[in-house]
Image: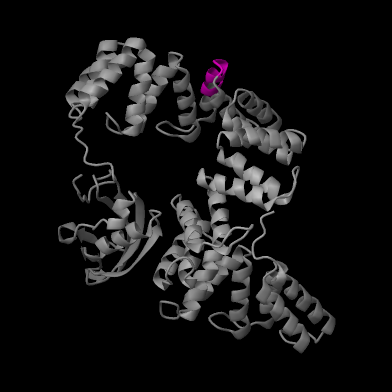
């Protein structure tokens, strides 16, 4: 496949990166501009190519008054550090014309997206004149026009004869089947240019003709606003039409609308009935959702044997949500005998089958050797990376910690900072505290107490125990924040009440020595000391 690099729009370039540049500075009368002719083409890391890694990375960068990159940071990861790093490297090769205010150059922040794809160079060259010629007649139900429209869209495709033959076979079977296929091609960008609005139109045409899969797809698009304006009432209408034809996916989706109150009053009892219909029809998600309702008593009376029954049926179809809930049942010994072995088995399956929360938990199990598993930090980190591909902030934070301490990967403060930054951008309190500590200690960067304090404050605002404790230490000493013994005491207490070990120990010492404005109190000191000892002896992670 050829490698190309484009600076236009957000359409994916073949085996290369497409970028989009946008300003995020509001105080410049003339925005900074890039001279992309002077940019080196981004180099696709060999390991990323071998592993077929793809994704979109968003960068924020500061353009100095001389047009150079003064600072750059990843604000949204592609999910792969190698691609993120390559994007940063490509950006740093660019030269910019700085923004101007009153005729003078100024520094300004801007944003850029790199889109890395491995789809290969497309040979599609849609015949737009033919599209315009045949589209209206095709929409009116003319089968020949529909065939010509499909031909026009797939013009230039290397295997056009094959894909047109497939389209003809569908058209000979029924007009609705061909309309649905055209919608699918427009939705996927295969044998037609990617166009979600046009895809929605053709799904809708097939749905109106009674095509049950098109009805489900049309309902889904209205539910999620994909190619159409979001409209829960329309989503419900199309799901009901499909359900009338016995479609179990539609039954499950109707249950979801009722369970979350989307376009209808939230009613879990009604949701349970729809889940039951889907479940009895063998639909894995219907079974998983019904099992979860029985497990937690949502919309039905709590019934652990029935929960186990439905979850096991769904798990037999490798449904990740059912595997996750069965894992919880075994680890808690709820409705089943307690078994770390069975709990770990289902947790591993859920992680392998794509449940993000389970990927994070299983990653921790492997990293620290929990639930009877042998510690394997490298594999544990691999599961965190898989979860991070979805943009999950908790996984990003966990990867940052692995790089910070060198667990499962070589210690790398720069990489730790980048991963923490991604999680911080999503408001993750743990990452805010961790990144703040790196700034406070100067890990891989110059010490910056002001940034540390700001991050601790953001973390503490979320009642994060680590953030509360670290802000307390600064407040007690009057470092980068006003000194206040009473405020520090309040922060320590809040952190300790959230079982943060260091805060418990600090309170024990404060009561023992009469610090932080407290009077010496041996009983309180002993109480906090005992709590600290109990916390230190407790497992770091409890999956119950």
Question: Was residue 245 drawn as part of the magenta stretch in this picture?
Answer: yes
Q: Is residue 217 above or below residue 423?
A: above
Name the residue at 22% across, 59% down.
33
Residue 220 in the figure: left or right of residue 537: left
In percent of width and height, residue 261 lies at 62, 34
In magenta, the rendered stretch is 238-246
| Image quadrant assignment for residue 442 | bottom left
Q: Is residue 141 above or below residue 270?
A: above
Q: 387 or 256: nearer the eye?
A: 387
Name the residue at 58% across, 54% down.
361
Q: Is residue 334 above or below residue 90?
A: above
| Image quadrant assignment for residue 141 | top left
Q: Residue furthest bottom?
A: 513
Residue 408 in the figure: left or right of residue 11: right
Question: Was residue 2 drawn as part of the magenta stretch in this picture?
Answer: no
Colour convention of the picture: one colour
Name the residue at 32% across, 29% down.
186
In percent of width and height, residue 61 lies at 32, 64
């Amino acid at each position: 496949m050829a490698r190309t690099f484009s600076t236009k729009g957000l359409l994916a370039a073949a085996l290369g990166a497409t970028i989009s540049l946008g300003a995020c500075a509001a105080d410049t009368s003339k925005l900074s501009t890039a001279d992309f002719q002077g940019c080196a083409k981004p180099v696709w890391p060999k390991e990323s190519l071998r592993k077929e890694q793809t994704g979109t990375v968003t960068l924020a960068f500061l353009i100095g008054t001389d047009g150079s990159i003064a600072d750059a940071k990843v604000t949204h990861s592609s999910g792969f550090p190698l691609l993120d790093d390559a994007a940063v490297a490509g950006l740093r090769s660019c030269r910019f014309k700085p923004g101007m205010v009153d005729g003078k150059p100024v520094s300004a922040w801007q944003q850029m997206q790199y889109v890395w794809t491995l789809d290969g160079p497309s040979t599609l060259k849609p015949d737009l004149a033919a599209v315009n010629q045949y589209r209206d007649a095709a929409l009116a139900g003319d089968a020949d026009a529909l065939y010509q429209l499909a031909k026009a869209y797939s013009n230039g495709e290397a295997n056009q004869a094959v894909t047109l033959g497939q389209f003809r076979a569908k058209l000979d079977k029924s007009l609705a089947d061909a309309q649905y296929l055209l919608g699918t091609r427009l939705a996927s960008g295969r044998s037609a240019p990617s166009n979600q609005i046009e895809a929605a139109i053709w799904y809708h045409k097939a749905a109106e003709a009674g095509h049950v899969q098109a009805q489900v797809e049309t309902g889904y698009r209205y539910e999620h606003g994909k190619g159409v304006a979001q409209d829960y009432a329309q989503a419900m209408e199309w799901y009901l039409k499909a359900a009338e034809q016995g479609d179990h996916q539609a039954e499950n989706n109707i249950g979801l609308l009722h369970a979350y109150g989307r376009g209808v009053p939230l009613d879990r009892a009604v949701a349970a009935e729809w889940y039951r219909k889907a479940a009895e029809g063998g639909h894995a998600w219907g079974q998983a959702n019904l099992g979860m309702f029985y497990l937690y008593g949502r919309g039905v009376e709590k019934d652990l044997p029935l929960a186990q029954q439905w979850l096991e049926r769904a798990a037999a179809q490798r449904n990740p949500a059912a595997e996750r809930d069965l894992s919880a049942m075994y680890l808690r010994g709820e409705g089943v005998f307690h078994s770390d072995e069975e709990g770990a088995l289902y947790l591993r399956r859920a992680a392998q089958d794509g449940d993000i929360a389970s990927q994070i938990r299983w990653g921790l199990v492997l990293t620290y050797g929990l639930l009877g598993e042998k510690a394997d930090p490298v594999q544990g980190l691999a599961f965190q990376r898989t979860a991070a591909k979805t943009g999950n902030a908790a996984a990003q934070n966990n990867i940052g910690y692995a790089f910070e301490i060198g667990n499962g990967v070589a210690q790398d403060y720069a990489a730790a900072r980048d991963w923490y930054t991604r999680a911080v951008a999503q408001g993750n309190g743990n990452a805010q505290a961790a990144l703040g500590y790196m700034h406070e200690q100067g890990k891989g960067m110059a010490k910056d107490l002001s940034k540390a304090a700001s991050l601790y404050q953001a973390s503490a605002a979320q009642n994060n125990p680590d953030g509360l404790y670290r802000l307390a230490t600064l407040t007690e000493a009057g470092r980068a924040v006003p000194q206040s013994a009473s405020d520090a005491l309040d922060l320590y207490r809040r952190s300790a009440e959230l079982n943060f070990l260091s805060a418990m120990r600090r309170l024990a010492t404060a009561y023992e020595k009469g610090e932080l404005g407290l009077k010496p109190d041996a009983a309180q000191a002993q109480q906090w000391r005992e709590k600290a000892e109990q916390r230190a002896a407790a497992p770091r992670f409890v999956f119950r």
